[in-house]
Amino acid sequence: MSDHQPNDWAMYDDGSAPESDIDEKDARLGIDTGQLRGKLTADAPLAKLVWFKAGGNADYLFEPADCDDLVQLMTMLNGSVPVMALGLGSNLIVRDGGVPGVVVRLGKPFSYVEPEGERGIDALTLCCGAGTPGILVASVARDHGIAGLEFLRGIPGTVGGFVRMNGGAYGREVADILVDCDVVMSDGNLARFPVEDLRYSYRHSALPDNAIVVSARFRGRRGDPRRIGEEMDRIADARENSQPLRTKTGGSTFKNPEGHKAWELVDRAGCRGMRLGDAQVSEKHTNFLINTGEASSSDIEGLGEEVRARVYKETGIELSWEIQRVGRP
């Protein structure tokens, strides 16, 4: 990609990425894994990597050493198998049968925030790696007097995930602040998408399924760091008081239908506290499902489907999943 400015991806690589534990010639993937510098693991458990702490294994889990390493993998695969990105593992149900193809976990090399003002470009713009948690983006913005990104404090995920789904909270969404994003396509091409090309709508973008966001630029407005910090604290307090933060959960389960709040519809249908095995509708916030013990992903998803059915029967409104559900049943 001719206009891509990678800002020296290697400087974020601490050099500790382990070698692949797959034979250099892998028959199932059909690639020479010896050309990869990151860690490639076959039949990799994913439950420990997702917030629900449930689900099956990935056929392969790849932890790239840097962006160039990811480009190498995608170029060799050239769309031959499914590929999906994994950040913090929030907003995700990994089904019990596991995930086909390759799950790409964007770790430390993709977790950074660079204020462009420090390079004399734009004092109100931050360049962020796709593995960066929202709270870190918001905190760096505060420290540099950049307002408008405070809501990222309330999104339990990483840049790649909330850029893909137009994540939002507290009246704001990514579409309000995104300048552009860099994406590795399924054929290994590194492309830059300006925000208008993503055709954002509520919790949706036009990004292809097998494409992986590797970085994004966000632009805010000039603000007072003290007031920005106060707004971040308000958001943190609101989450603490209203959401089951210290549980095994996936975050907001259903999208808000136009003109309605999902949690109110769930409550009206009598689903508060409803259980299926160890899966439960949260008593604290009814748009959260929680794993109270050893729930399977089937239990969690099945409970969500029962909630949807009861809400539709009670209100005539069909709830849509906000949590991404991936893999084989």
Image (cartoon, rainbow, N blue to C red):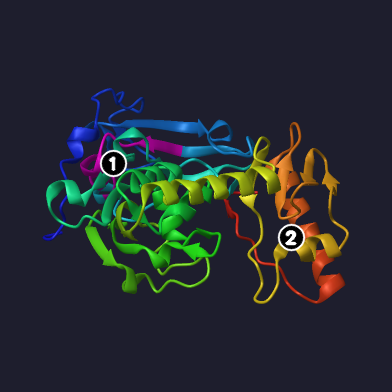
Which residue is identified by label 2?
263
Indicate which disc, 1 or 2, sits on the residue closer to the N terminus: 1
Quadrant in the picture for residue 124: bottom left
Above or below 93: residue 246: above
Give whichever of 218, 212 is nearer the camera. 218
Viewer-nearest of labels 1 and 2? 2
In the structure shown, which secondary structural element does the residue marked by tag 1 occupy?
strand
Q: Tell me where the magenta segment starts and ends, as one range.
A: 60-74
Above or below 44: residue 289: below
**Three-letter code for the amino acid on which mark 1 is drawn:** Ile
Which residue is identified by label 1?
31
Residue 212 appearing in the image? no
How many residues crowd around disc 1 within 10 Å: few (fewer than 14), some, or many (20 or more)?
A: some
Q: In which quarter of the image is the N terminus?
A: bottom left
Give whichever of 258, 73 is nearer the camera. 258
Q: Where is residue 303 in the image (x, y as percent from the top left)?
A: 78, 51
**Three-letter code for the amino acid on which mark 2 is drawn:** Trp
Quadrant in the picture for residue 276: top right
Above or below 59: residue 307: below
